Amino acid sequence: MSKFSTISYSVGSLLFLISCSFSIYYGYKVITHDLPKEQKTVEKYNYHFVLVPEEMDNEYWKLVEKGAKDAAKKYGVLLEYAGPKQANIDDHVKTIEMSAASKVDGIMTQGLSDEQFTPLINRVVSSGIPVVTVDTDAANSRRLAYIGTDNYYAGYLAGKALIADTFGKVNVAIITGSFYANHMQQRVKGFEDAVKREKRINIIAVEESEISRVKAAEKANHILQEHPEVTAFFGTSALDGIEIAHVVTKYHKQKQIYIIGFDTLPETLGFIREGTIHATVVQEPYQMGYGAVKMMIDLLKGNKVPTIVHTDTKIIRKSDLPVSNQDRKAVDK
Ligand code: BGC
């Protein structure tokens, strides 16, 4: 090696070391992988978090993502939104494992079932990566905190709403997102407990939609054929009520069916406005996403964070919705 190249080699190494120590000193990390092309430039951020929902292409989860992204922008966090496009436990678990393997600073996800998620969350936490559960808690795991609806209470509210809105004998069918997921079990249990002392109300079928629109519609149709005595439905996840409403308006219009759903997606609100869905349980997905990012930052900074943060839950009906332009025109006519 010539004298000149030795010098330039040493200067280069020195500059490299200086720039590394600056990065470490300022706590910045550099990421250039797994990002969309336009973001592939070197970026600076304070933390790298991953939000793993059970279904990425779901309007409800897009609201959680929006909240998380807004908080991430405000606090200098690189936030990845990754997981199965359509609900799939294996892909969900794999995404959490991969995020842990790539040593992100924090993982926000649902604690869907004790069987599959508790040991996984425990493993991730013992590897030094904090986990915050969002929307669905794995209360028996070592997750550091939960933010989301009190799912038992939300189901209980739905049961009370059905009691308040109906009279005489009511035969209810429940379509739930999953028989195995903690939040769905809690919503169904809350509902059952709310109606159990009401003699006039009978739950006659409980079916599973697997968080799929097609399955929810199939199950609703099947229930109406098998149990023509059904007079009410409770849909426990965001798409269930919508699909029950589609089936009822398409094939069973002549029947008087009471429907109570979950969440306030635009389609649900549309069905409430036209009177097909009678009530829905409000959740705060944006707050969940925003709050989860803030909690994670606080945890990493060593600040005290409450173990459980319940976001607001309430019931709304048509009378609670602002009057739409369409309704206004109909009244004016
Ligand atoms: C639940 C989510 C679920 C979604 C499915 C919501 O009510 O809170 O956990 O993924 O419904 O559409």
Image (tube, rainbow, N blue to C red):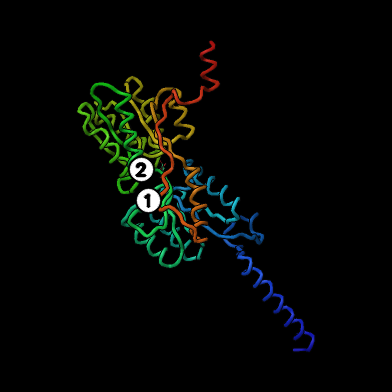
Are discs 2 and 1 less than 8 Å apart at CB?
A: yes
- Determine the residue located farthest toward the top in the rendered image: 333
Q: Residue at x 35, y 35 (%)?
A: 235
Whether residue 84 is visible here, answered yes or no, is yes
Q: Residue at x 40, y 58 (%)?
A: 143
What kind of residue is marked 2?
A: Asn
Q: Secondary structure at mark 2?
A: helix
What kind of residue is marked 1?
A: Asp
Tell me if 244 is positioned left or right of 64 in this view: left
- Please tell me whether residue 102 is drawn above or below residue 182 in the rendered image: below
Q: CA distance from mark 2 to mark 1?
A: 9 Å
Image quarter where ligand 1 lies? top left
Ligand 1 closer than 8 Å to label 2 CB: yes
Q: Name the residue carrying label 2.
A: 151
Q: Quadrant of residue 166?
A: top left
In the image, which disc is placed on residue 8? none
Q: Residues within 10 Å of mark 2 (few under 14, many from 20)?
A: many
The quarter of the picture where the N terminus appears is bottom right
